[in-house]
Image (cartoon, rainbow, N blue to C red):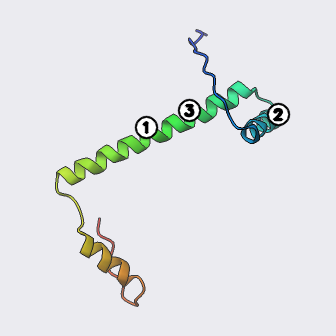
């Protein structure tokens, strides 16, 4: 199996967080580095998804595919009644 190139990052973290990481590493029988790689990978994935969703939303705005504030307010107000308005998609 080919070895992946790596780069060392150094970060100062608050002691309570460091202690939690050490506890998790011990409980999972994994290294501190493995825990950090998992955390960073999850964060990067989350930020990439947030960016994708933002671009998608901006494309909807550019295309005029939006719901005006009054319509949203009317829908929200209807939720407290016996006859709530349908959700518009």
Within-10-Å neighbours for mark 2: few <14, some 14–19, many 20+: few
- On the image, numbered disc 2 is attached to which residue? 26
Q: CA distance from mark 3 to mark 2?
A: 20 Å
Question: Which residue has dot 3 on it?
Answer: 41
Q: Distance between the Cα atoms at labels 1 and 3?
A: 11 Å
Residue pictured at 23% horizontal, 52% vertical:
60
Q: CA distance from mark 1 to mark 2?
A: 30 Å
Secondary structure beneath label 1: helix
Q: Position of residue 48 (x, y in %)?
A: 43, 37
Figure quadrant of the C terminus: bottom left
Q: Are marks 1 and 3 in contact (CB under 8 Å)?
A: no
Residue 70 x %, y %? 25, 75
Relative to residue 58, is residue 39 depicted above or below?
A: above
For residue 48, which numbered disc appears in the image?
1
Q: How many marks?
A: 3
Q: Of helix, strand and loop, which one carries label 2?
A: helix
Label 1 or label 3, whichever comes before in sequence order: 3
Tell me the crowding category of disc 1: few under 14, some 14 to 19, or many 20 or more residues within 10 angstroms, Cα based.
Answer: few
The residue located at (70%, 38%) in the rendering is: 14
Residue 19 x, y percent position in the rendering: 79, 38
Is residue 61 found left or right of 19 in the rendered image?
Answer: left
With 29 as the anchor, is 72 left or right in this view?
Answer: left
């Amino acid at each position: 199996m080919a070895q992946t190139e790596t780069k060392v990052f150094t970060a100062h973290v608050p002691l309570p967080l460091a202690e939690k990481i050490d506890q998790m590493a011990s409980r999972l029988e994994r290294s501190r580095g493995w825990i950090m790689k998992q955390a960073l990978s999850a964060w990067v994935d989350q930020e990439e998804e947030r960016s994708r969703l933002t671009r998608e939303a901006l494309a909807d705005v550019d295309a005029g595919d939006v719901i005006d504030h009054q319509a949203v307010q009317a829908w929200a107000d209807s939720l407290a009644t016996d006859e709530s308005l349908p959700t518009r998609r």
